[in-house]
Image (cartoon, coloured by chain):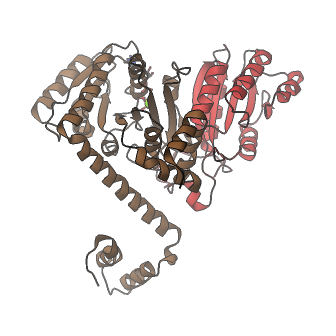
Chain colours: A brown, B red
């Protein structure tokens, strides 16, 4: 096994090493996955912030503006920005970086784009693993921009320590935002494009609705207005993120979230791995072939066949 | 996967199996498309971006007015295997040497660089001599560019 601290040194000395390792982990290269094995014990130190919200609300622009402010204190920061892959070709246009070009010469900022590669829910298959790499490499703060998503992009809630939901006026009147469900995962809610008509109204509406119901953790969810282009209000967004970070530590919620994250990553990995294996070579599993045959002969319902197949995993006793 | 440069429609019902590698295919190749120089036209670059996406590439697009330093920084951080540069300003003979030099300084000499735009035939040999893989003049078919990149993109090798 490779020595983890030597590995981190290599990542620091060779500027190409971390980006390349990320590519190879994304491609499930066995060498890179071994490097991740070695690095994994070093992870868990970074604060991971998810930035999510409907397409075009200004997530990337807001990140660029946040990064400017984060750098004032000298904190290094990594950005992982996900865009959707074409379901037809498998290719992707990764266009988030274009909003974040200003700090290209700043060695304390690392921006990486990735494609969802067919995964639904706002993240890519390898997003969590790339976050682990950035974490091990020593970035204390990692911002993850999800695919622009209306409703079902809630996977970020289990990957991130803090979730910022970005809305903007002009995409409905705010009631849509409440109905969409994405607000429920927000630890901080931002109405971006505060220079646009309807922004004040949207802020008021969202504040009212958050005054009534509360997020899962019984913490008041701040609703803030920002203009990502001028930077107005962005200081408050950063302050709210930092406040949530402190709150997690003071209330012990960070440990709860980490456990939830570990659980979600293992379970979703398990699901994916099973699906892939079965899709590739169903005949390679005699148990599966047998189960399908029994269902075909009407000896067993599909539900019981699934129970039989998963019994070794769940520890239940099915014959 | 990258050889499928067929015309595609936006048919969302087609299900893409998770990650190509398990199917014995090459994982998507990462490409940076950038426009160095001061001309403000990126229609051609955007058309190429779409064509590459439709051919299965993952394309980082950084848009207009990119300096050599910005191009090298993006290529490094995004770990692209290919850089496509489109120049319409006529400044190619000053820009290309600076870009290639910057890439070398960043340790990116193995990245495949291709060029397109309004580059006169007489300059092509000099540009290729700098280490640019291919120069695509005006009127080049998109499929020619896509095929060239598909065939010549280096596979990402382990960093040590
Ligand atoms: N007027 C105004 N425009 C903004 C603001 N923030 C972003 N924009 C513009 O909104 C558009 C989309 O911004 P992005 O930052 O790319 O939005 P995004 O949410 O990252 O988009 P996707 O990643 O495609 O979902 C761009 O044209 C931005 O210039 C803002 O505060 N005010
Ligand atoms: Mg974006």
Q: Quadrant of residue B45?
A: top right
Q: Nearer the viewer, residue B56 or A259?
A: A259
Q: Position of residue B144 (x, y in %)?
A: 76, 40
Side (left or right) of A28 relative to A269: right
Q: Residue at x 38, y 18 (%)?
A: A73
Q: Nearer the viewer, residue B96 or B50?
A: B96
Split into quadrants, the picture shows ligand 1 in the one at top left
Q: Is residue B42 above or below residue A309?
A: above
Q: Residue at x 57, y 32 (%)?
A: B77
Extreme-left residue of the structure: A212
Side (left or right) of A116 relative to A188: right
Q: Quadrant of residue A226?
A: top left
Q: Position of residue A21 (x, y in %)?
A: 56, 44
Q: Is residue A126 above or below residue B49?
A: below
Side (left or right) of A282 relative to B116: left
Q: Is residue A54 above or below residue B151?
A: above
Number of numbered callouts drawn: 0
Q: Residue at x 37, y 27 (%)?
A: A57
Q: Position of residue B106 (x, y in %)?
A: 67, 28
Q: Is residue B119 visible?
A: yes
Q: Residue at x 33, y 71 (%)?
A: A313
Quadrant showing the C terminus of chain B: top right
Q: Is residue A124 visible?
A: no
Q: Nearer the viewer, residue A76 or B46?
A: A76
Q: Position of residue B154 (x, y in %)?
A: 71, 44
């Amino acid at each position: 096994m490779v020595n983890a601290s030597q590995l981190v040194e290599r990542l620091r000395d060779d500027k190409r090493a971390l980006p390349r390792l990320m590519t190879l982990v994304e491609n499930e290269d066995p060498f890179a996955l071994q490097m991740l094995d070695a690095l994994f014990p070093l992870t868990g130190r970074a604060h991971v912030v998810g930035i999510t919200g409907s397409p075009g609300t200004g997530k990337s622009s807001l990140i660029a503006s946040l990064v400017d402010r984060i750098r004032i204190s000298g904190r290094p920061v990594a950005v992982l920005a996900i865009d959707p892959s074409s379901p037809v070709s498998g290719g992707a246009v990764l266009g988030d970086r274009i909003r974040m070009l200003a700090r290209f010469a700043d060695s304390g900022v690392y921006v990486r784009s990735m494609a969802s590669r067919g995964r639904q829910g706002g993240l890519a298959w390898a997003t969590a693993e790339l976050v682990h790499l950035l974490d091990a490499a020593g970035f204390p703060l990692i911002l993850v921009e999800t695919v622009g998503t209306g409703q079902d992009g809630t996977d970020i809630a289990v990957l991130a320590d803090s979730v910022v939901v970005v809305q903007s006026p002009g995409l409905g009147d705010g009631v849509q935002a409440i109905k969409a469900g994405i607000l429920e995962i927000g630890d901080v809610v931002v109405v971006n494009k505060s220079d646009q008509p309807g922004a004040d109204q949207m802020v008021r509406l969202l504040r009212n609705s958050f005054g009534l119901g509360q997020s899962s953790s019984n913490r008041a969810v701040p609703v803030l207005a920002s203009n990502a282009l001028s930077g107005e209000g962005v200081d408050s967004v950063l302050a709210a993120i930092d406040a949530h970070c402190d709150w997690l530590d003071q209330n012990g919620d960070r440990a709860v979230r980490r456990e939830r994250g570990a659980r979600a990553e293992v379970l979703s990995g398990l699901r994916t791995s099973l699906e892939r294996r079965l899709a590739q070579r169903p005949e390679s599993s005699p148990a599966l072939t047998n189960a399908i045959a029994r269902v075909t002969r009407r000896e067993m319902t599909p539900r019981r066949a699934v129970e039989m197949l998963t019994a070794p995993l769940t520890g239940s006793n099915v014959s | 996967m990258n050889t499928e440069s067929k015309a595609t429609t936006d048919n969302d019902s087609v299900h893409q199996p998770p990650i190509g590698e398990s199917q014995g295919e090459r994982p998507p190749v990462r490409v940076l498309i950038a426009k160095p120089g001061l001309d403000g036209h990126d229609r051609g670059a955007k058309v190429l971006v779409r064509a590459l996406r439709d051919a299965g590439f993952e394309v980082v697009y950084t848009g207009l007015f990119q300096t050599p330093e910005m191009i090298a920084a993006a290529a490094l951080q995004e770990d692209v295997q290919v850089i496509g540069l489109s120049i319409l300003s006529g400044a190619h003979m000053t820009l290309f040497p600076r870009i290639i030099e910057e890439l070398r300084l960043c340790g990116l000499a193995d990245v495949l660089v291709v060029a397109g735009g309004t580059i006169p035939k007489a300059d092509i040999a000099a540009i290729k001599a700098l280490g640019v893989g291919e120069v695509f003049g005006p009127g080049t078919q998109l499929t020619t560019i896509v095929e060239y990149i598909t065939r010549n993109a280096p596979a990402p090798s382990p960093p040590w």
